[in-house]
Amino acid sequence: MQNPVFQLRNELLLFQRVKSDCKMHLTKPLNNNHQTAEELFAASNEKLHQEAKEWLMRTGENCTILSIFIATVAFAAAYTVPGGPNQETGIPILKGKPLFVVFIMADVISLTFALTSVGIFLSILTSTFPLQHFETYLLKKLTLGIKFMVFSVSMMAVAFGATIVLIMTHGWESVFWYVIAFLPVPIFFLSYSPLRSAVLMRSTELVKNFVPILLLPFSFLAYGAKRTMKKFPIYGNNTQPTQSTAARCTPV
């Protein structure tokens, strides 16, 4: 069964496409029930609109709870630094270690992005959910909030890996612990995010749009090389000059 939010968005996109193809004066007349085209569309999709609203509310609430939990863990980690503080000065014992800086930066970024995602999800929950916002606006906000949340989880995994390496091990084993610490991130993204397929589809569209732009300089180079070859032909070992070229090259 298709997601009601994406189904409603497809209906809105189709409606806008048909509306753009029609003359302006043809979209204003009333039908037998004294309804305009917009009013008829809203009445026909009222049930779908309600289902999409409930799904978006439920998803926003779940994401808000998870983002608050991530922010709580990141906030608590800032006060329980790896190695602990010096009992006399209160300065962290491992402050001079490079990975300690990685831990602090990852923890701060995780907390910042988690709080940002909370704000985005709360703005969705407090929305009035007008029908036209389901076309792009609400989906963009939900996708942006989930991206911030996933990035926050990623930074938390980096902070956790830095803590493990600082306390427990050194050398080649550090790579193993970092991989283990970062493993929940792709699992979380693949299993939790309800917009995974939409994000991947959007990413594929962006790649398809940007590849021709990136290849444009190479196209000009190839075109210039082709024109140069036509103007100044270079003969290889197995290439024979044409009769006209041989005639021009024959001394008088």
Image (tube, rainbow, N blue to C red):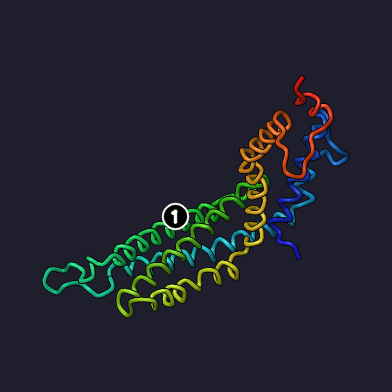
Q: Position of residue 249 (x, y in %)?
A: 75, 26
Left or right of 185: which side holds 203? right
| Quadrant where the image shows the C terminus | top right
Residue that appears at 66% across and 33% down: 224
Determine crowd level at label 1: few under 14, some 14-19, many 20+ residues with C-alpha closer than 10 A.
some
> Residue lying farthest top?
252
Specify whether residue 188 is in view.
Answer: yes
Is 242 situated above or below 161? above
Q: Position of residue 47 (x, y in %)?
A: 74, 57
Say which quarter of the image contains residue 125: bottom right
Residue that appears at 66% across and 61% down: 197
Say which quarter of the image contains residue 51: bottom right
Secondary structure under tag 1 reads: helix
Task: Report which residue position mark 1 lands on.
Answer: 116
* Nearest the eye: 115 or 45: 115
Q: Position of residue 149 (x, y in %)?
A: 49, 61
Left or right of 146: which side holds 159? left
